[in-house]
Image (spheres, rainbow, N blue to C red):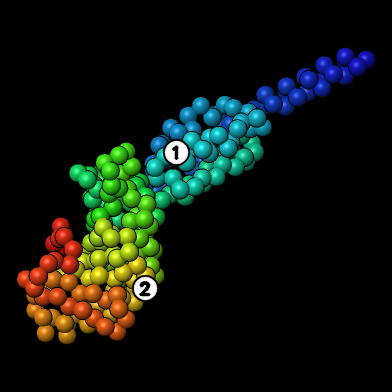
Amino acid sequence: MTAVVSFGTYRLVHLVLSADALRVSKITVHGNERMSHGEVLAVLDGLRGHSMVTADLESWRQKLLDSPWVADAEIRRVLPGTLTVAIAERKPMGIGRIRDGLYLLDQEGAIIDEYGPNYAELDLPIIDGLAASGGGQTLVDGNRASLAGRVLADLRQRPDLAARLSQIDVSDPRDAVIILKGDTALVRIGDDHFVERIQSYVDLRPALRDRVPSIDYVDLRFGERVYVRPLGAGPKGRNRNRTGG
């Protein structure tokens, strides 16, 4: 009798697991912008047809996280036979000029992808000074990337100022230097109070230009004291490699 009951239980479990309603027949995707629907499904290739009950969704989620554009992902079971995939993509905030290449960077200063013509519509600041020393496999210095990320994160509070930003130089991880669009001056903003210092320069710029028409750099790191160096007055404030934006 026990054997009959055990066989009956096995058959019931087998039938449940093999029921069409419990097999993955449909995968829906939302939240993706840069990654196409087809690219997401390609990562999940092989999941369709699996049992909804036994499929290891966490391992498939980890495969999605291996994609450079995916910051986070969630996969949920929805009966009958459907999996919903929610994608949270990384947001490109700058274009890193590193060694001989250009790379899209996220808000943490981490590389998303190599920059190319397919991203030409993105209006993002150039970020210099990120390269790790030593010429090893690590492209980006963590402290410098952190400084760039903090500048960009601060500017998210002020889209009007963010839209003015042309370049950031983080060669010194304690002193970010920026160039604004339509300007030539290097503006030293240190390692904190970025929005306040950039706004201060925007407010002061007309008066500064009246007094010093050709400015090499402006140093805003010392509270109410503003230091201005004219072009040609000794060593440069920071090695210039600007786009002219």
Local secondary structure at mark 2:
loop
Please state the horizontal and vertical placement of residue 155, each as a whole percent of the image: 35, 68
Q: Residue at x 69, y 26 (%)?
A: 17
- Image coordinates of residue 236 in percent, x first then y, are 13, 66
Quarter of the image with the N terminus in it: top right
Residue at 16 percent of width and 82 percent of height: 208
Q: Nearer the viewer, residue 97 or 95?
A: 97
Check the image and name the residue furthest to the right.
1
User: How far across and down, in percent of the image, does residue 228 sit?
Assistant: 17, 78
Q: Amino acid at mark 1?
A: Asp
Total numbered badges shown on the rendered structure: 2
Residue at image position (56%, 42%) is: 75
Work out whether residue 131 or residue 234 is closer to the camera in this orientation and state it. Answer: 234
Toward the viewer: 169 or 74? Answer: 169
Q: Nearer the viewer, mark 2 or mark 1?
A: 2
Relative to 33, residue 37 above or below? above
Image quadrant where residue 15 sits = top right
Residue 127 placement, left or right of 60:
left
Amino acid, disc 2:
His
Mark 2 → mark 1, Cα distance in angstroms: 34 Å
Query: Residue 52: x, y in percent?
Result: 63, 32
The residue under the point 26% across, 41% down is 135
Which of the numbered marks, if any, corresponds to residue 121? Answer: none
Question: Which mark is drawn over residue 66?
Answer: 1
Q: Is residue 196 above or below residue 191?
A: below
Image disc number at residue 193:
2
Dot 1: element? loop
